[in-house]
Image: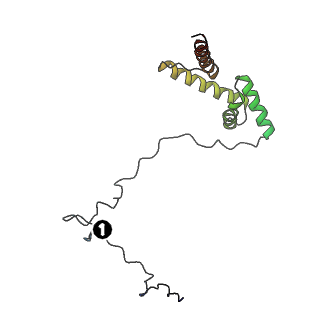
Amino acid sequence: LERPDPPSVKTQRSPVPPPPRSLGSASCDSVPGSPGLSPYVPQPPLSAPPPPPNMPPLLPPPQPAVSLENLVENCQKLLEKFHYSWEMMPLVLVILNYAGSDLDEASRKIDEGKMIINEYARKHNLNIFDGLELRNSTRQKMLRSEINNISG
């Protein structure tokens, strides 16, 4: 069997792209009577966007290097002081890092955050449960429904 020749390009393509059209010239995609601006082409913004509000820096200020063992030890001390579970270690580690591994400063930041949350809850009449209260209330409901299913 004979194989046919593969298709080939009959005319040479120009490596030079076509010149850009000016916005003022009429084109096929412009609206009649308009100065040649297409409704499908995004228009440049009329003014620059407003500057962002004054935000605190995203990165902590540069500090002397602290050994990993010392950082973890201080983190453990904060977890014990505030009676946090070990799952809170990443958050406490970040707070400690921003405080420059200073236990007193990190404690103040945690206390400040707790005060802000409590004030917000009070102002907005929110009832905030900690995990233990929430878990216990859920367990009690489950136990009551199981008892009702068995006795009823």
Task: Name which residue lies at 76% across and 43% down.
Answer: 65
Across and down, in percent, residue 31 comes to 23, 64
Across and down, in percent, residue 146 comes to 61, 16
Q: How packed is label 1: few (under 14 Cα within 10 Å), some, or many (20 or more)?
A: few
Task: Name which residue lies at 70% across and 27% down.
Answer: 85
Viewer-side residue, 88 vs 123: 88
- Indicate left or right for 130 with 70 as reference: left
Specify the farthest residue to the bottom. 2
Against 141, residue 66 (above or below) is below
Across and down, in percent, residue 139 comes to 62, 18
Against 61, residue 42 (above or below) is below
Specify the farthest residue to the left. 33
Across and down, in percent, residue 63 comes to 71, 42
State which quadrant residue 12 falls in.
bottom left
| Quadrant location of the C terminus in the rendered image | top right
- Indicate left or right for 152 with 69 as reference: left
Viewer-side residue, 13 vs 44: 13
Against 104, residue 140 (above or below) is above
Element marked by disc 1: loop
User: Three-letter amino acid code at disc 1?
Assistant: Leu
Viewer-side residue, 104 vs 26: 26
Task: Name which residue lies at 41% across and 78% down.
Answer: 17
Residue designated by label 1: 23
- Indicate left or right for 107 with 142 as reference: right
| Quadrant location of the N terminus in the rendered image | bottom right
